[in-house]
Image (cartoon, rainbow, N blue to C red):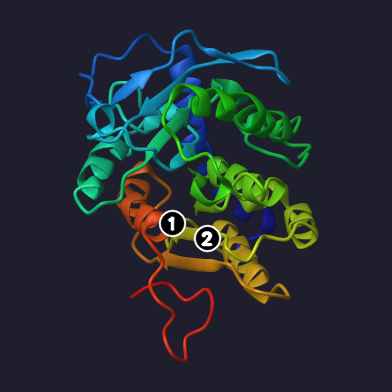
Amino acid sequence: MLPATVRFLVAALALLASTLAGRALATDEPQARPGTAGSGVHVIEPPMRIPGLDRMRTVRIYLPPGYAASGKHYPVLYMHDGQNLFDDATSYAGEWGVDESLDALAKDGIELIVVGIDHGGDKRLNELNAWPNPRFGAAENAAYTDFIVETLKPWVDDHYRTRPGREDTGILGSSMGGLASHYAIHQYPQVFSRAGIFSPAYWVAGDAVFDWTAAHRLRRDSRLYFAAGGKEGNDMTGPFERMVAQVRAAPGPQPALHAGIVAPAEHNERFWREEFPKAVRFLYAPAPPAREGGRAGDPAP
């Protein structure tokens, strides 16, 4: 087994691969790559203020293809790292293709609004972590999540045709964004019923996240989609498996839960882009009838 210092460095490098996105975008000259965002994506103007942190933040909105003409109201998915979701020109290492994936899913009747919150550049690590870590500085995720719940969501519900109830509201992210999504659905179960938790950086929070999770129960109709890459290293996949086991072993009715480690996948946007439409199908497609002999939390085949 590798020494603890080496194992820590391996995990730290995986985390830095996503955190460098914020630092690069905060300091580099504008990128020359052409924009790839579809016509359903636009940026809210002006940027919004995060009250608890006194920072301004760009927010991006995706509307499904039939939004303008339908008059319908839609479920909403809140996502972190908005720069990486829709547009290759603003992404660090390639976009997730969220708009392309959702345009395709709309043909199958899965339509939703996505609200992408840009990360805070060199503040990303702090803003997406709710548990103090002496190596990485202050934990600011409580204030960031309060912003989503108390400022951003009411604004979105006022300005767009949303279905604002918790049963139609989800949150999803990767790496530090996976950690932040885990916090959000446990801290605000009355607001979020669905969470996509990709490659969560549980190791940043240490044992505190497990103790905290045990004290913050999910509601029985929650839906969780966990995913990690098999090549992300033991310091990522070990805590991932521990958390999935803890959630499954919690007393009482179980939430619907999918969890998978994808053997060839690494800690990068390519993996998350491929996993995104699978997660949306699980989180937002109508639940299938209960199978005889099945158990709560079994993923659909």
Quarter of the image for residue 48 reads: top right
Q: Mark 1 is on which residue type?
A: Leu
Q: In the displayed image of the protein, which residue is found farthest to the front? A: 71
Q: Secondary structure at mark 2?
A: strand
The circle on residue 223 is 2
Name the foreground residue: 49 vs 132.
49
Q: Position of residue 147 (x, y in %)?
A: 65, 27
Quarter of the image for residue 12 reads: top right
The vertical placement of 17 against 298, above or below, is above
The vertical placement of 289 against 234, above or below, is below
Task: Sort mark 1 into few (<14), some (14-19) or many (20+) by Cα contacts within 10 Å.
Answer: many
The residue under the point 73% across, 75% down is 251
Q: Position of residue 198 (x, y in %)?
A: 48, 52
- Residue 174 showing in the rendered view: no
The residue under the point 45% across, 31% down is 115
Q: Position of residue 116 (x, y in %)?
A: 45, 30
The circle on residue 35 is none
Q: Position of residue 178 (x, y in %)?
A: 54, 47
Residue behind mark 1: 283
Give the spatial CA distance, label 2 vs label 1: 6 Å
Task: Kindly indicate whether the residue at mark 1 contacts the one at mark 2 (C-beta within 8 angstroms).
Answer: yes
Name the foreground residue: 104 vs 70.
70
Q: Secondary structure at mark 1?
A: helix
Q: For the image shown, how many numbered marks are present on the structure?
A: 2
